[in-house]
Image (tube, rainbow, N blue to C red):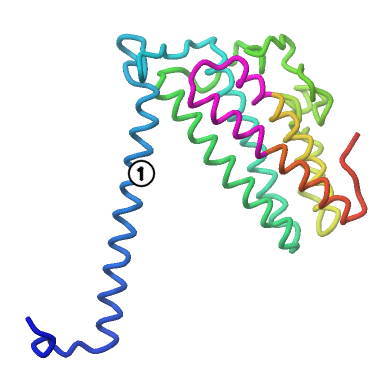
Amino acid sequence: MTEADTPDVPAAGRAVTVSRTTWLAVGAVLLALVFAGWATVTALGRDAGGTGTGAAGAAVPGDESADAGFARDMSVHHQQAVEMSFVVRDRTTDEEVRRLAYDIANTQANQRGMMLGWLDLWRLPKVAPDREPMSWMGHGDGHGGAHSGHGSASAADGALMPGMATRAQMEQLRAASGKAAEVLFLQLMIDHHKGGVDMAEGCVRACAVPQQKTLAQGMVDAQESEITLMTEMLAKRGAKPRA
C-alpha cells in the first residue's frame, strides 16, 4: 500500500494507536523480565524436594544453614525498615527524607520478597520459633556482632535483632512530626542499617548459595553508603547519630 493509499486517520486516532502499540511493547518487555527473574530464582531451588541439589549441582540449604537463617532473619529486619519508612513518609513534607524513605522501602521490600521466595523454593519454613534470632551466626543470645549495641535493647522491648527499633521507639516515631520525625527516623535507620550490615557480612562469610552471598554483599555496600548519607542529613539538621 502506498502512502497515497493510506487511510486518512485523524491525529487523535494515530495517537491512540501509537499509545496502544507502545504499551503492548512495554508490557512484553516487562513480562519477559518477570519470566527471566522467575527462571533465575527457580534455578536456586530446583530439585529442592528431590535430589537435594540446585543449580549447577549445588546443595540446597538445610533448615539450620546460614542461608536459611539469614533469609529468615533479614526478612524480619527488612520488614521493620519498610514500616519505619512508611511512617516517616506521613510525618514530614521534607522531600529529601521522603525520597530516602521511598528508596529504602522499595529496595528492602524487594529484597525481602526474594529471600522469602528462596525459602519457599528450598521448601523451608519462613519462621523458626524454636531458634534464637541470628543463632546461625553463632550468636546464641541473638544479639552479637560488631554493631550489637545499636538500637537493640531486648527482645521484650521488640528489638529482636541488632539495630531494630524497640516498640517504644516506633511509637515515638509515629508520634513525631516535621524535623523531630526526620531526625529520629535518620537516627533509628542508621542503627538499623548498622545491624543489617553486621548480619549481611555474616552471610557473606557463612552462606553457601552464591546468589545469596551476592545479595548480602550488595546490602553491605548499599547500606554503608546510606549510613554516610544519613549522617550528613543529620548534620544538616543540627543532629548526630546516636551513640
Q: Name the residue under label 1.
A: 34
Res. 173 visible in picture: no
Q: Where, quadrant-wise, is the N terminus in this rendering?
A: bottom left
- Residue 36's spot in the image, x, y percent? 34, 39
- Residue 52's spot in the image, x, y percent? 36, 10
- Residue 176's spot in the image, x, y percent? 82, 52
The amino acid on which the numbered mark 1 sits, given as a three-letter code, is Val
Residue neighbourhood size for the residue with mark 1, other residues' Cα within 10 Å, grouped as few (<14), some (14–19), many (≥20): few
Count the marks: 1
Q: Is residue 143 above or below residue 182?
A: above
Q: What range of the chain is rendered magenta?
A: 199-222
- Residue 204 appears left or right of 148: left
Asked if the stretch drawn in magenta spans residue 184, the answer is no
Q: Residue at x 65, y 43 (%)?
A: 83
Q: Which residue is drawn at 61% across and 36% down?
A: 79
Q: Where, quadrant-wise, is the C terminus in this rendering?
A: top right
- Residue 41 appears left or right of 157: left
